Amino acid sequence: MRSLLAEVLPRFDASEVHDVWVPAPPEVVFAAVKEVTLREVRLLLPLMALRGLPRLLARRPGFRPARSAPVLDAFLDVGFVLLGERPGAEIAVGTVGRFWRLAGNEPAALRTREDFVTFAEPGYAKAAMAFVVRPEQGGSRVVTETRVVGTSPDATRAFLRYWRAIRLGSGAIRRSWLAAIRRRAVRTR
């Protein structure tokens, strides 16, 4: 079966994959993927605050969701769209924007998976992120993958420069997110 990311973003300019084994059944782990909160992903809010500093200095509103909100729900409130879900196994979200702007991203207006797939206006990047959960060795393997593609050569170059600057922080957030999923799943199994 093709992954949701392969369906919506088969070609990409940058990607990152992280995974963790969790000693819990897939249904418990998948529930944790959907329920883990911003507070539980220890690095997310501090790194997002750092990223939002130029926006704050420019007196523009930033990303300020409730700490108790599930991460995926918070993302859906700020410009991401659900790209698909295979209950108990896989979920993907995506957004389109100019992530490299110093004063912060202003996502393109998307409402549906189709909006994401067909978006082609030059000067943007399309980013998609998925979590896949599968049974493995008496527990589960949860894998997160992020893919990004520019909608034009200039956008691709701008994004790749930005990616070089933030990639370590992005990876740290993903690993922190996986650790939060693991903690929640182990606690609730």
Image: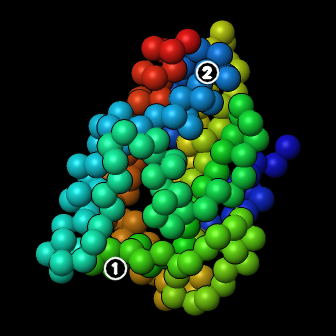
Judged from the image, the secondary structure of the residue bearing numbered disc 1 is loop
Q: Is residue 147 visible?
A: no
What amino acid type should be assigned to the residue bearing mark 1? Answer: Arg
141 horizontally vs 53: left or right: right
Q: Which mark is residue 28?
A: 2
Q: Relative to the observer, which residue lies in front, 106 or 65? A: 65
Pointer 1: what residue? Answer: 101
What amino acid type should be assigned to the residue bearing mark 2? Answer: Val
Q: Which mark is residue 35?
A: none
Image x and y of residue 153, in percent: 55, 87
Name, please, the residue furthest toward the left: 57
Judged from the image, the secondary structure of the residue bearing numbered disc 2 is helix
- Relative to 27, residue 156 above or below: below
**Disc 2 vs disc 1: Cβ atoms closer than 8 Å?**
no
Specify few, some or many for label 1: CA neighbours under 10 Å numbering under 14, 14-19, or 20 or more: some
63 horizontally vs 139: left or right: left
- Relative to 89, residue 67 above or below: below
Q: CA distance from mark 2 to mark 1?
A: 38 Å
Give the image quarter of residue 28.
top right
Q: Relative to the observer, which residue lies in front, 8 or 66? A: 66
Q: Residue at x 46, y 23 (%)?
A: 184
Specify few, some or many for label 2: CA neighbours under 10 Å numbering under 14, 14-19, or 20 or more: many
Q: Residue at x 46, y 41 (%)?
A: 70
Image x and y of residue 119, in percent: 67, 80
- Relative to 33, residue 139 above or below: above
